[in-house]
Image (cartoon, rainbow, N blue to C red):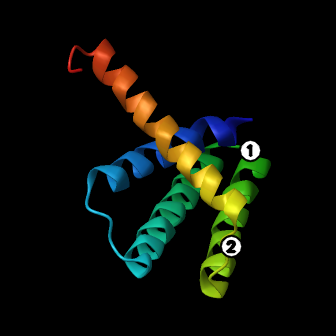
């Protein structure tokens, strides 16, 4: 699906950026994640208007934002979500290390 090819790199970069910085408080993280998801939805909306992104990808981005906001407001996070977030962070670090090695910066 086009959505995952677009969203995965953006989320990986966001995770790397967060990992590289000092860990901010929960409220700051929520604001930053919200801003990233808003931007992803906006970019997909622009691409949707040109026909580069299908309805399903745009809907998925909007749904991801709505789900995030609902869960953030409720303060929900279970063990599986923590494990998935850790996996995403490690995958982003791996992708960055591989990119740096290819670019001769590792």
Q: Is residue 52 visible?
A: no
Seen at 61% across and 44% down, the residue is 50
Q: Is residue 65 left or right of residue 20?
A: right
Seen at 28% across and 50% down, the residue is 20
Seen at 20% across and 20% down, the residue is 105
In the image shown, does 19 or 57 lie closer to the viewer?
A: 19
Residue 13 image-quadrant placement? top left
Picture layout, residue 94 above or below residue 29 = above
Say which mark, if any, is on residue 66.
2
* Label 1 secondary element: loop
Q: In the displayed image of the protein, which residue is found farthest to the front?
A: 79
Q: Is residue 44 visible?
A: yes
| Label 2 Cα crowd, 10 Å radius (few <14 / some 14-19 / many 20+) | some
Q: Which residue is mark 1?
A: 54
Picture layout, residue 82 above or below residue 30 = above
Quarter holding the C terminus is top left
Marks 2 and 1, how far apart at CA: 19 Å
> Which marked residue is nearer to the observer: mark 2 or mark 1?
2
Tell me where residue 7 appears, x and y as whole percent: 58, 45
Tell me where residue 41 appears, x and y as whole percent: 58, 59
> Going from the N terminus, do you reach mark 2 or mark 1 first?
1
Seen at 67% across and 77% down, the residue is 76
Quarter holding the N terminus is top right
| Label 1 Cα crowd, 10 Å radius (few <14 / some 14-19 / many 20+) | some
Residue 45 image-quadrant placement? bottom right
Q: In the displayed image of the protein, which residue is found farthest to the right?
A: 56
Tell me where residue 33 appears, x and y as whole percent: 48, 66
Picture layout, residue 13 above or below residue 62 = above
* Label 2 secondary element: helix
């Amino acid at each position: 699906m086009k959505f995952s090819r677009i969203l995965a790199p953006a989320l990986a970069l966001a995770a790397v950026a967060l990992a590289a910085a000092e860990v901010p408080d929960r409220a700051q993280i929520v604001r930053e994640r919200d801003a990233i998801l808003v931007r992803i939805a906006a970019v997909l909306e622009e691409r949707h208007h040109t026909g580069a992104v299908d309805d399903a990808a745009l809907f998925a981005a909007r749904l991801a934002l709505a789900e995030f906001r609902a869960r953030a407001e409720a303060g929900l996070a279970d063990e599986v979500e923590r494990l998935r977030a850790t996996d995403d962070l490690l995958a982003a670090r791996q992708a960055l290390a591989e990119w740096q090695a290819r670019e001769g910066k590792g």
